[in-house]
Amino acid sequence: MSAAGLLLIVVAFAFLYFILVRPQKRRQQESQRMLSNLAVGDEVLTAGGIYGRVVDTEDDALFVEIAPNLRVKVARRAIGAVIPPAEPDEEEDDDEESPEEDTPAADDAG
């Protein structure tokens, strides 16, 4: 095997490492960080697609309220995402006040 062939193999492995391995490790670290930072009051989405609010925590489990007075015990690793709190959007208020600005006038058509 020549030096060029060996160099090609090393470059291929380096390419695969940077394309496949590093992004996967980064995703795992972000997921682990998200799960360890879960706190009471966080809005979450489970891996099964259920939305709820964390009401209590244990070591490897969370109690999630999915409806008024309905709490379920969920494994911490079953949390798929933390839903960021909704911020009031000022643009929506402006759109509701003046809907005629969005529709073209009839006499502008000709």
Image: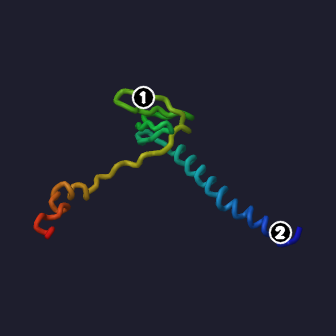
Q: Three-letter amino acid code at disc 2? A: Gly
The secondary element bearing badge 1 is classed as: strand
Q: Dot 1, crowdedness within 10 Å: few (<14), some or many (≥20)? A: some
Looking at this view, name the residue that lies furthest to the top: 69
Please name the residue that numbered disc 1 is placed on.
Answer: 71
**Where is residue 85 shown, x and y percent of the image?**
37, 48
In depth, the one of 7 and 25 nearer the eye is 7
Q: Residue 5's mark?
A: 2
Q: Residue at x 53, y 43 (%)?
A: 35
* Residue 99: image tag: none
Q: Is residue 58 visible?
A: no
Report helix, strand or loop for mark 2.
helix
In the visual, does 105 lie left or right of 89?
left
3D distance between C-alphas at marks 1 and 2: 61 Å
Rendered-image quadrant of the N terminus: bottom right
Residue type at the position of mark 1: Arg
